[in-house]
Amino acid sequence: MGWGQEPHEGWADEKLPDGRWLGPTRRGEPDPVALRATCSCGWHSEREHAVPPRPDHPRDERGIGHGPAYDAWIAAHEAAENSCWDDWRAEHFDPLLGYEPSTQLILGRSDGGPRHFLNGHPVHAGSSLELLLADGTWLRIRYEWDWQPDTEPTAYAALGVPAGAENLTDAPLVSFKLPARAILRWPENRP
Ligand SMILES: [Zn+2]
């Protein structure tokens, strides 16, 4: 139905025209007037996202709406649902998980351009960072980014080479996108 899993399954609850909230039942008539983030544990956001009224629109032979006004209404509904997902995650679920903001890449600006910050310090292309792995170890990575706010930074990690070969050949590199929830820290010798 929604996001996450029991006991914290979130969804966009529907406010009916009479002011009642639909709750965890199947969607039906009438159309909602607003949506708000709700969780199966009983939590709900205080923020309501209004949904515009259904426009007059043509219907096809199956009764399904179509046309620009209908498409715009569907898009507005989806935007309200996405806002609820943002609310559920930011207000409720992420705090439950306990991520520390000081261990996350935070997108900000410096010198007129977008830039990530880690624990208050700007992260530059080529910066060495340490990435927490599932077994509790930290992996040294090199950070690179193309300055596009909608793309994730790339992590590069150097692989090992045979003993004695360090001076003869470059270490092979592996790269991967850094997900938004990567836990990072600065190396102890941060410049
Ligand atoms: Zn919950």
Image: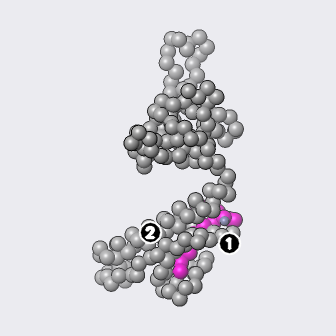
The image quarter in which residue 189 lies: top right
Q: SS of the residue at dot 1?
A: loop
Q: Position of residue 122 (x, y in %)?
A: 51, 37
- Quarter of the image that includes the C terminus: top right
Q: Nearer the viewer, residue 126 or 138?
A: 126
Q: Main secondary structure of the magenta part?
A: strand
- How crowded is the residue under tag 2: few (<14 C-alpha within 10 Å), some, or many (20+)? few
At horizontal 44% and vertical 76% (from top left) the residue drawn is: 51
Q: Secondary structure at mark 2?
A: helix
Per the rendering, the mark at residue 78 is: 2
Residue 61 in view: no
Residue 57: give x, y in percent of width and height.
31, 82
The spot of residue 159 in percent (x, y) is 56, 25
Judging depth in this view, the residue of 152 and 187 nearest the camera is 187
Q: Residues within 10 Å of mark 1 (few under 14, many from 20)?
A: few
First-in-chain label (1 vs 2): 1
Residue 12 drawn above or below residue 165:
below
- What amino acid type should be assigned to the residue bearing mark 1? Gly
Quarter containing ligand 1? bottom right
**Location of mark 1 (residue):** 42
Residue 158 in the image: above or below residue 14: above
Q: Is residue 7 magenta?
A: yes
Which residue is depicted at the point 59% across and 28% down? 190
> Magenta residues?
3-15
